[in-house]
Amino acid sequence: MSATPVSYPAWSPLILDGPGRLSRPSDPVAPACHAQDADRHDCHGPEDDLRTTAEAVIADAGLLQAIEQEKLALDADDPRLPVLSKEAMDTAVRLHVEVSMERELAAEASGRGPSVD
């Protein structure tokens, strides 16, 4: 069986570049700041951070789904299966970090401060 290769988002991987902020190492302006806003000093507001984090969650959830769909199309002895499984695990870990960050951002934006488990 042949499977469609997984395509990764252009912004991947994301890094934390400050409290609750995601960006790519190669980006001169973090994704929350649009190019037309690059000269603004306040382009990293809570709404931008939440939007950027939500977009990262959506992208990684879609990536995880694509990886899992590709794995379903493979035979159990396909040598690509371990590689795809690791990619799925790495994506799931990143997704967990992003969702945890989103939870913290939402709590801070609502004035409740960082959440406590």
Image (cartoon, grey):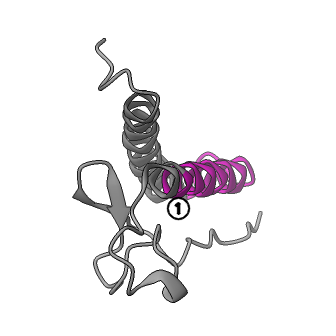
Q: Secondary structure at mark 1?
A: helix
**Residue ID for mark 1:** 80
Q: Residue sitting at 31 percent across and 25 percent down?
A: 113
Residue 108: give x, y in percent of width and height. 37, 32
Tell which of 97 and 50 is nearer to you: 50
19 relative to 112 in the view: left or right = left
Residue 54: give x, y in percent of width and height. 57, 49
Q: Quadrant of the C terminus?
A: top left
User: Relative to 103, does residue 26 appear above or below in the rendering?
Assistant: below
Q: Amino acid at mark 1?
A: Arg
Residue 50: give x, y in percent of width and height. 50, 48
Tell which of 17 and 67 is nearer to you: 17
User: Is residue 93 one of those drawn in magenta?
Assistant: no
User: Relative to 42, does residue 116 appear above or below in the rendering?
Assistant: above
94 relative to 60 in the view: left or right = left
Give the magenta part as a residue range.
51-78
